[in-house]
Amino acid sequence: MSYYTVSGLVKGGLPILIITCFMAIIVGLLLGYQEDILIEYPTLLILMPVLLKIGGDTGSMLGSRLSSAFHLGLSRGILNNPVVKNSVIAAIIVAVISSVFVSVIVYLINLALGYGTSVMLIFGVSFIVVILDILIVYTTAVAFSALSHKIGIDPDDVVIPIVASMGDLVGVIGIMIAIIAFGLVVI
Protein backbone atom coordinates (compact mmCIF):
# COMPACT_ATOMS: atom_id res chain seq x y z
CA MET A 1 0.00 0.00 0.00
CA SER A 2 1.27 3.45 -0.87
CA TYR A 3 0.96 4.86 2.63
CA TYR A 4 3.78 2.62 3.86
CA THR A 5 6.38 4.37 1.72
CA VAL A 6 8.43 7.31 2.95
CA SER A 7 6.58 9.69 0.65
CA GLY A 8 3.23 8.15 1.67
CA LEU A 9 4.05 8.56 5.35
CA VAL A 10 5.18 12.16 4.85
CA LYS A 11 2.12 13.04 2.74
CA GLY A 12 -0.16 11.44 5.30
CA GLY A 13 1.62 12.69 8.42
CA LEU A 14 2.66 16.24 7.61
CA PRO A 15 -0.84 17.73 7.18
CA ILE A 16 -1.96 16.08 10.42
CA LEU A 17 1.08 17.44 12.26
CA ILE A 18 0.36 20.93 10.97
CA ILE A 19 -3.26 20.67 12.12
CA THR A 20 -2.25 19.40 15.57
CA CYS A 21 0.31 22.22 15.89
CA PHE A 22 -2.47 24.75 15.34
CA MET A 23 -4.60 22.93 17.91
CA ALA A 24 -1.71 23.17 20.40
CA ILE A 25 -1.42 26.90 19.76
CA ILE A 26 -5.13 27.29 20.53
CA VAL A 27 -4.64 25.32 23.76
CA GLY A 28 -1.79 27.66 24.74
CA LEU A 29 -3.88 30.73 23.99
CA LEU A 30 -6.76 29.40 26.09
CA LEU A 31 -4.41 28.67 28.98
CA GLY A 32 -2.96 32.17 28.74
CA TYR A 33 -6.47 33.60 28.88
CA GLN A 34 -7.05 31.96 32.30
CA GLU A 35 -3.55 32.55 33.67
CA ASP A 36 -4.66 34.59 36.69
CA ILE A 37 -7.17 31.97 37.87
CA LEU A 38 -4.67 29.15 37.37
CA ILE A 39 -2.06 31.00 39.43
CA GLU A 40 -4.65 31.72 42.13
CA TYR A 41 -5.62 28.03 42.27
CA PRO A 42 -2.36 26.06 41.95
CA THR A 43 -4.25 22.81 42.53
CA LEU A 44 -5.78 23.30 39.08
CA LEU A 45 -2.25 23.47 37.66
CA ILE A 46 -1.50 20.11 39.27
CA LEU A 47 -4.77 18.62 38.00
CA MET A 48 -4.63 20.03 34.47
CA PRO A 49 -1.86 17.96 32.83
CA VAL A 50 -3.28 14.75 34.25
CA LEU A 51 -6.79 15.47 32.99
CA LEU A 52 -5.44 16.38 29.56
CA LYS A 53 -3.48 13.14 29.57
CA ILE A 54 -6.53 11.05 30.53
CA GLY A 55 -8.59 12.46 27.64
CA GLY A 56 -5.84 12.18 25.06
CA ASP A 57 -4.59 8.78 26.18
CA THR A 58 -7.95 7.06 26.55
CA GLY A 59 -9.14 8.60 23.28
CA SER A 60 -5.94 7.44 21.57
CA MET A 61 -6.36 3.95 23.02
CA LEU A 62 -9.87 3.89 21.61
CA GLY A 63 -8.74 5.22 18.24
CA SER A 64 -5.87 2.75 18.09
CA ARG A 65 -8.15 -0.18 18.88
CA LEU A 66 -10.63 0.91 16.20
CA SER A 67 -7.84 1.51 13.68
CA SER A 68 -6.65 -2.05 14.26
CA ALA A 69 -10.20 -3.30 13.84
CA PHE A 70 -10.48 -1.48 10.50
CA HIS A 71 -7.17 -3.01 9.40
CA LEU A 72 -8.62 -6.42 10.29
CA GLY A 73 -11.80 -5.90 8.31
CA LEU A 74 -14.31 -3.90 10.37
CA SER A 75 -15.87 -1.75 7.70
CA ARG A 76 -19.62 -1.75 8.08
CA GLY A 77 -22.14 -1.48 10.83
CA ILE A 78 -19.95 0.79 12.95
CA LEU A 79 -22.81 2.06 15.13
CA ASN A 80 -24.01 -1.39 16.20
CA ASN A 81 -20.70 -3.19 16.04
CA PRO A 82 -19.68 -4.91 19.29
CA VAL A 83 -16.00 -4.02 18.74
CA VAL A 84 -16.88 -0.31 18.65
CA LYS A 85 -19.39 -0.55 21.50
CA ASN A 86 -17.09 -2.53 23.79
CA SER A 87 -14.11 -0.31 22.99
CA VAL A 88 -16.07 2.85 23.81
CA ILE A 89 -17.44 1.35 27.04
CA ALA A 90 -13.95 0.26 28.10
CA ALA A 91 -12.55 3.74 27.36
CA ILE A 92 -15.31 5.33 29.43
CA ILE A 93 -14.65 3.00 32.37
CA VAL A 94 -10.90 3.65 32.24
CA ALA A 95 -11.44 7.42 32.02
CA VAL A 96 -13.90 7.58 34.91
CA ILE A 97 -11.80 5.39 37.22
CA SER A 98 -8.63 7.32 36.31
CA SER A 99 -10.37 10.63 36.90
CA VAL A 100 -11.65 9.64 40.34
CA PHE A 101 -8.24 8.22 41.32
CA VAL A 102 -6.45 11.37 40.14
CA SER A 103 -8.95 13.62 41.90
CA VAL A 104 -8.33 11.83 45.21
CA ILE A 105 -4.55 12.03 44.80
CA VAL A 106 -4.65 15.70 43.79
CA TYR A 107 -6.95 16.49 46.72
CA LEU A 108 -4.50 14.82 49.11
CA ILE A 109 -1.62 16.80 47.58
CA ASN A 110 -3.78 19.93 47.89
CA LEU A 111 -4.24 19.22 51.62
CA ALA A 112 -0.56 18.41 52.17
CA LEU A 113 0.55 21.63 50.49
CA GLY A 114 -2.14 23.72 52.19
CA TYR A 115 -3.62 25.17 49.00
CA GLY A 116 -7.18 25.11 50.34
CA THR A 117 -8.94 24.18 47.10
CA SER A 118 -12.26 22.53 47.85
CA VAL A 119 -12.86 18.88 47.13
CA MET A 120 -15.96 19.89 45.16
CA LEU A 121 -13.89 22.04 42.81
CA ILE A 122 -11.35 19.28 42.20
CA PHE A 123 -13.96 16.58 41.56
CA GLY A 124 -16.18 19.02 39.65
CA VAL A 125 -13.40 19.97 37.26
CA SER A 126 -12.55 16.30 36.75
CA PHE A 127 -16.19 15.39 36.15
CA ILE A 128 -16.74 18.13 33.58
CA VAL A 129 -13.56 17.27 31.69
CA VAL A 130 -14.33 13.53 31.62
CA ILE A 131 -17.89 14.12 30.39
CA LEU A 132 -16.59 16.34 27.57
CA ASP A 133 -13.93 13.75 26.74
CA ILE A 134 -16.58 11.06 26.46
CA LEU A 135 -18.82 13.21 24.28
CA ILE A 136 -16.24 14.93 22.07
CA VAL A 137 -12.91 13.10 22.13
CA TYR A 138 -14.38 9.60 21.87
CA THR A 139 -16.75 10.67 19.11
CA THR A 140 -13.77 12.14 17.28
CA ALA A 141 -11.84 8.88 17.73
CA VAL A 142 -14.64 6.78 16.28
CA ALA A 143 -15.37 9.23 13.46
CA PHE A 144 -11.75 9.73 12.41
CA SER A 145 -11.04 5.99 12.58
CA ALA A 146 -13.95 5.26 10.24
CA LEU A 147 -13.43 8.26 7.97
CA SER A 148 -9.70 7.84 7.49
CA HIS A 149 -10.14 4.16 6.66
CA LYS A 150 -12.97 4.93 4.27
CA ILE A 151 -11.00 7.53 2.28
CA GLY A 152 -7.86 5.40 2.20
CA ILE A 153 -5.68 7.19 4.73
CA ASP A 154 -3.96 4.96 7.27
CA PRO A 155 -5.96 5.47 10.51
CA ASP A 156 -2.77 4.90 12.53
CA ASP A 157 -1.27 8.09 11.05
CA VAL A 158 -4.34 10.22 11.62
CA VAL A 159 -6.34 9.09 14.61
CA ILE A 160 -3.83 9.16 17.47
CA PRO A 161 -2.33 12.62 16.75
CA ILE A 162 -5.75 14.19 16.16
CA VAL A 163 -7.36 12.52 19.16
CA ALA A 164 -4.46 13.31 21.51
CA SER A 165 -4.57 16.96 20.46
CA MET A 166 -8.36 16.97 20.74
CA GLY A 167 -7.96 15.59 24.28
CA ASP A 168 -5.76 18.58 25.16
CA LEU A 169 -8.16 21.07 23.60
CA VAL A 170 -11.28 19.55 25.16
CA GLY A 171 -9.51 19.26 28.53
CA VAL A 172 -8.58 22.93 28.61
CA ILE A 173 -12.05 23.96 27.45
CA GLY A 174 -13.53 21.70 30.15
CA ILE A 175 -11.37 23.32 32.81
CA MET A 176 -12.44 26.76 31.58
CA ILE A 177 -16.09 25.70 31.72
CA ALA A 178 -15.56 24.41 35.27
CA ILE A 179 -13.85 27.65 36.30
CA ILE A 180 -16.88 29.57 35.04
CA ALA A 181 -19.40 27.07 36.49
CA PHE A 182 -17.80 27.26 39.94
CA GLY A 183 -17.83 31.05 39.83
CA LEU A 184 -14.06 31.51 39.92
CA VAL A 185 -14.25 33.94 37.05
CA VAL A 186 -17.01 36.01 35.54
CA ILE A 187 -17.20 36.23 31.77
Image: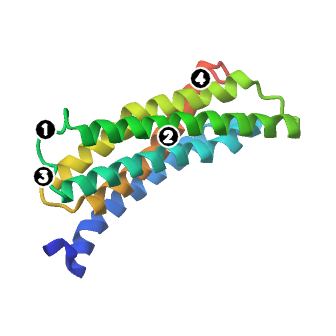
Whichever of callouts 2 and 1 sits on the residue coming sooner in the sequence is 1
Q: Amino acid at mark 1?
A: Gly
- Neighbourhood count class around disc 2 (C-alpha, 10 Å): few under 14, some 14–19, many 20 upward: few
Question: Which residue is at a point 61% across and 46% down the rendered structure image?
Answer: 50
For the residue labelled by badge 3, is the local secondary structure a helix, a strand or a loop?
helix
What residue is pinned by disc 4?
180
What residue is pinned by disc 3?
150
What residue is pinned by disc 1?
77
Whichever of callouts 4 and 3 sits on the residue coming sooner in the sequence is 3
Between residues 145 and 69, which one lies in front from this camera angle? Answer: 69
Q: Is the residue under label 4 in contact with that under label 2 (CB below 8 Å)?
A: no
- Neighbourhood count class around disc 4 (C-alpha, 10 Å): few under 14, some 14–19, many 20 upward: few
Relative placement, left or right, of 111 versus 141 is right
On the image, which quarter does residue 139 sit in?
top left
Q: Is the residue under label 3 in contact with that under label 1 (CB below 8 Å)?
A: no
Taking 153 as reference, is 52 above or below it? above
As drawn, the residue found furthest toward the bottom would be 6
Residue 36 visible from this viewpoint: no
Q: Spatial distance from mark 2 to mark 4, Cα to Cα? A: 27 Å
What residue is pinned by disc 2?
94
Relative placement, left or right, of 8 versus 158 is left
Taking 59 as reference, is 178 above or below it? above
Between residues 19 and 80, which one lies in front from this camera angle? Answer: 80
